[in-house]
Amino acid sequence: MESVAIGGRTFAIMRIASSNRNATARLKGETIVISLPSRWQASERERVGASLMKRAVRAIEKGRWKPGRAGRARFFHGQRLRALGREFEIIMARGKRFGAKAKGQRIEVRAAEHPDADTRISGLVRREITRELMPQLLGRVNAINETHFQASIPKVTVRDNLTRWGSCAPDGAISLNFRLLFMPERVLDYVIVHELAHTRYRSHGPRFWALVEKALPGHREQRKWLRENGHSVLADGAPQAEGWAEEPY
């Protein structure tokens, strides 16, 4: 197996072919895993694989990626968050059972003694924040869709995905990463445009990118921000997650 030395440590390199639409790079333990769509031509796999490998090495060198277990967004008592122009404060208290409810700017959480308490609490907070922001998010998706795409969108979901900023199903259903709600709104718009463009073109060819540029001129600036900063959103106070990157975001 290939390997690379970074900062005095040796990382194994694993390359795998997948049935996925996008290429990804992940740090699993001390192994950099490069996953490339098997449907791509060999030259495209080589080009994108080399790009992802460079980004992975750079991320490890700068301390953005560290060996460890993958972790989802975590929340803690007193935490203040800003999402889509709204402020939220997390208030936690002990209880006999788990529960959460949004009350204005406060997300009030009851947590029971349980070995998996952190995971349950995080799920409850995500649910409440998503519920509060979903009307706003749907309005944003629908406005962009009506202006630029006029596609049939059966549903929009939000998930705390570890390896993808968004996805578009064959039927036009859109899924967005929960962390996008806490990013600059222009970055969120870019991912929405990106996924809506897939209702016209499934691949990332010239026509796809021309459509993205038409809907969101200057989108490269948002792509750059996402690549350089997206991994750090909601990382404070959380266990260090495995690093990951995806092309062509």
Image (spheres, grey):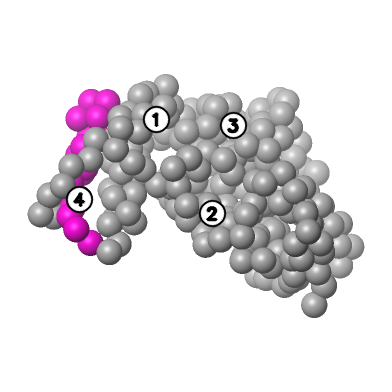
The numbered mark, 1 or 2, whose residue comes first in the sequence reads 1
**Residue lying furthest front in this view?**
8
Q: Position of residue 112 (x, y in %)?
A: 17, 55
Please report the bounds of the magenta region as a residue range. Answer: 98-114
The kind of secondary structure element at disc 1 is strand
Tell me how far mark 3 sits from mark 1, CA to CA: 17 Å
Is residue 112 in the magenta section? yes
Q: Amino acid at mark 1?
A: Leu
Q: Which residue is mark 2?
A: 241
Q: Is residue 160 above or below residue 103?
A: below
Name the residue at 57% across, 40% down: 232
Label 3, residues with CA under 10 Å away: few <14, some 14-19, many ≥20: many
Name the residue at 44% across, 43% down: 237
Instruction: Classify residue 225 as left or right of residue 2.
Output: left
The numbered mark, 3 or 1, whose residue comes first in the sequence reads 1
Name the residue at 59% across, 31% down: 187
Q: Amino acid at mark 2?
A: Ala
Q: Nearer the viewer, mark 1 or mark 4?
A: 4
Q: Nearer the viewer, mark 3 or mark 1?
A: 1
Tell me how far mark 4 sits from mark 2, CA to CA: 23 Å
Tell me how far mark 1 sits from mark 4, CA to CA: 20 Å
The kind of secondary structure element at disc 2 is loop
* Viewer-nearest residue: 67 or 248: 67
The kind of secondary structure element at disc 3 is helix
Q: Are marks 1 and 2 in contact (CB under 8 Å)?
A: no
Q: Amino acid at mark 4?
A: Ala
